């Protein structure tokens, strides 16, 4: 892994599969609240999955499309049951379709961990909020959406030295974000921190049965990756706007 194209290829084998086969990542963790002069609080458990298909942009190209859908669910922090309400408010789970990315060679941050390699992706986000305060005063934290997504993907060096199109991997994910729209906290100072860890599964069938059943009942298409590129990406904020166009 000595140049950006080789680094990206190694990341692609870790995050997905070079042969275009579907790859499922599953993760679990917790969501914490923070606000000035208030203690940190674990408000939700969190469990989710992403089903991805990697598509090469032309034969021999060093650029890729990562086609994905992702679903994730807010859990009771103690019982770990999927929540339908929170403080008498309806919970809006994560149904992001699509959640696509375009990749081209770049100096992927890596850390040598001896027998393992860690690929780090640090993604600061700042753009006009899909939920302007004037239109969503109860559900919007501000007119600019700002968040920080921190990913780490871990693969064995010996696996990366092989020729398989996909290698086993584990991952961690931390996210700092505003209050979720459905929490109805308006412009109150503070926000949420997500802290999760997971792994690349052998197949979608390895997703916990409870979660597969929940998806099958509500949005069964989330068991598979998209077939082709579409845009724009869905987020919790744009999905909330679809559900509440006149809030």
Image (spheres, rainbow, N blue to C red):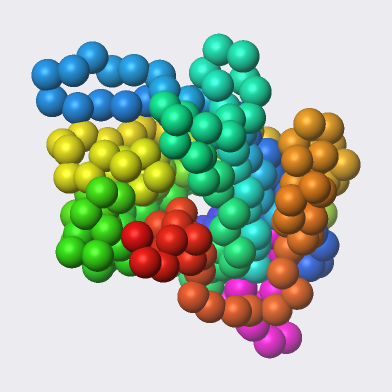
Say left or right for 199 vs 189.
right
Position of residue 80 measured from the top left corner of the image (x, y, whole percent): 62, 20
User: What residue is rendered at 12% in x and 19% in y?
Assistant: 37
Look at the image and tell me in which quarter the C terminus lies.
bottom left
Say whether residue 108 is visible.
Answer: no
User: What residue is rendered at 69% in x and 59% in y?
Assistant: 52
User: What residue is rendered at 18% in x and 18% in y?
Assistant: 38
Position of residue 46 measured from the top left corner of the image (x, y, whole percent): 55, 31
Position of residue 11 measured from the top left corner of the image (x, y, whole percent): 59, 55
Say left or right for 95 vs 129.
right
**Residue 199 occupies which quadrant of the picture?**
top right
Identity of the residue furthest to the bottom in this view: 58
Q: Is residue 165 above or below residue 207?
A: below
User: What residue is rendered at 80% in x and 47% in y?
Assistant: 217
The verdict on residue 213 being magenta is: no
Say left or right for 147 vs 80.
left
Q: Is residue 38 above or below residue 235?
A: above
The verdict on residue 54 being magenta is: yes
Identity of the residue furthest to the left in this view: 37
The residue range painted magenta reads 52-65
Say left or right for 133 vs 122.
left
> How many numbered badges does the structure rendering display?
0
Identity of the residue furthest to the right in this view: 205
Position of residue 78 measured from the top left corner of the image (x, y, whole percent): 55, 12
Look at the image and tell me in which quarter the N terminus lies.
bottom right
Q: Nearer the viewer, residue 195 or 220?
A: 220
Q: Nearer the viewer, residue 50 or 56?
A: 50
Q: Is residue 82 above or below residue 60?
A: above
Say whether residue 51 is visible.
Answer: yes
């Amino acid at each position: 892994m000595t140049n950006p194209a080789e680094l990206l290829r190694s990341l692609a084998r870790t995050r997905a599969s070079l042969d275009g086969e579907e790859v499922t990542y599953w993760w679990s963790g917790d969501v914490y609240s923070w606000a000035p002069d208030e203690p940190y609080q674990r408000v939700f458990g969190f469990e989710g999955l992403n089903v991805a298909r990697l598509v090469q942009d032309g034969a021999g190209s060093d650029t890729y499309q990562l086609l994905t859908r992702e679903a994730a669910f807010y859990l009771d922090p103690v019982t770990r049951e999927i929540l339908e309400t929170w403080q008498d408010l309806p919970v809006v789970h994560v149904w992001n379709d699509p959640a696509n990315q375009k990749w081209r060679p770049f100096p992927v941050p890596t850390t040598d961990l001896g027998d393992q390699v860690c690929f780090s992706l640090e993604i600061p986000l700042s753009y006009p909020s899909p939920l302007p305060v004037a239109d969503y005063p109860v559900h919007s934290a501000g007119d600019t959406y700002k968040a920080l997504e921190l990913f780490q993907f871990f693969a064995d060096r010996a696996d990366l030295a092989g020729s398989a199109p996909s290698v086993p991997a584990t991952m961690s994910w931390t996210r700092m974000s505003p209050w979720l729209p459905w929490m109805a906290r308006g412009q109150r100072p503070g926000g949420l921190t997500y802290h999760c860890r997971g792994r690349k599964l052998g197949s979608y069938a390895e997703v916990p049965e409870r979660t597969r059943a929940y998806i099958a009942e509500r949005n069964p298409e989330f068991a598979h990756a998209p077939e082709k590129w579409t845009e724009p990406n869905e987020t919790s904020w744009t999905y909330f706007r679809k559900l509440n166009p006149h809030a």
